[in-house]
Amino acid sequence: MGNEKFLRKNNIQYFMTNGKIHIKVGSLEVDYEGTEEYIKNDLLTTVEKVKEMFGIEELPRVPAQSSMIVPPTSVTSGGFPKGTVKTIAAKMKANTGPDLALAAAAQMTLVEGRDSFSRKQILETMKKAAGYYKDSFGSNLGQTLINLVKKQRLHEVSKDTYSLPQEVREELEVQLA
């Protein structure tokens, strides 16, 4: 599995696994990766403290039947099989800076399950695609992002923060399937 932890206390060995959770309710969004024990016992308290810090009075109610716990699988929270940006770039035949920026956006959205990502995160993800990334892609990234926004291949949700438009996401899901 790769995410197990063995702890020994008072000659008793404890087996703990890591969990990953993304919660988005209204304007409140929480990402956590760590022990399942924390998720089960302390995450709700943390969410309540965040709610207080930002003055969020009440979160929208979610019907009981829609809440469920999904056991971990080889598929990430984004719903796509695990894969690197290099794998996505290969499937997309990414030859240009804009192609690789879009591959990075696809990896962060479809594989990692992110709703949005920063310019810095796009660049860091692009650099992980050895054999595809060129230094000129990084130096031209500002203009690349402007052009991708103009062509509606990316949305700029706030300054230097982007997301994949739904139409582009659906197109990439088909292309990468």
Image (cartoon, rainbow, N blue to C red):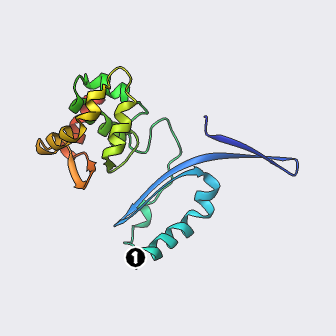
Tell me what residue is drawn at x 14 percent, y 44 percent: 152
The residue shown at (58%, 58%) is 39
List x then y, in percent, for residue 20: 52, 49
Above or below for 69 versus 78: below
- Extreme residue in the right direction: 11
* Circle 1 Cα neighbour tier, 10 Å, few/some/many (<14 / 14–19 / ≥20): few
Apparent side of residue 174 relative to residue 120 in the rendered image (left or right): left
Q: Which residue sits at x=33%, y=51%?
A: 115
Depicted 18 relative to depicted 141: above or below: below
Q: Amino acid at mark 1?
A: Ile
From the image, tell me which residue sits under label 1. 56
Report whether 32 appears left or right of 80.
right
Q: How many marks?
A: 1
x and y percentages locating residue 107 in the rendered image: 35, 37
Residue 147 location (% of width, % of height):
14, 40
At horizontal 26% and vertical 48% (from top left) the residue drawn is: 163
Asked which secondary structure carries label 1, the reply is: loop
Q: Is residue 155 visible?
A: yes
Quarter the C terminus occupies: top left
The answer to whether 61 appears left or right of 161 in the picture is right
Measured along the vertical axis of the image, is residue 93 above or below residue 85?
A: above
Where residue 76 sits: x, y (%)?
Answer: 44, 40
Q: Quadrant of the N terminus?
A: top right
- Residue projecting furthest to the left: 150
The residue closer to the viewer here, 166 or 143, is 143
Tell me if I can see residue 173 in this picture: no
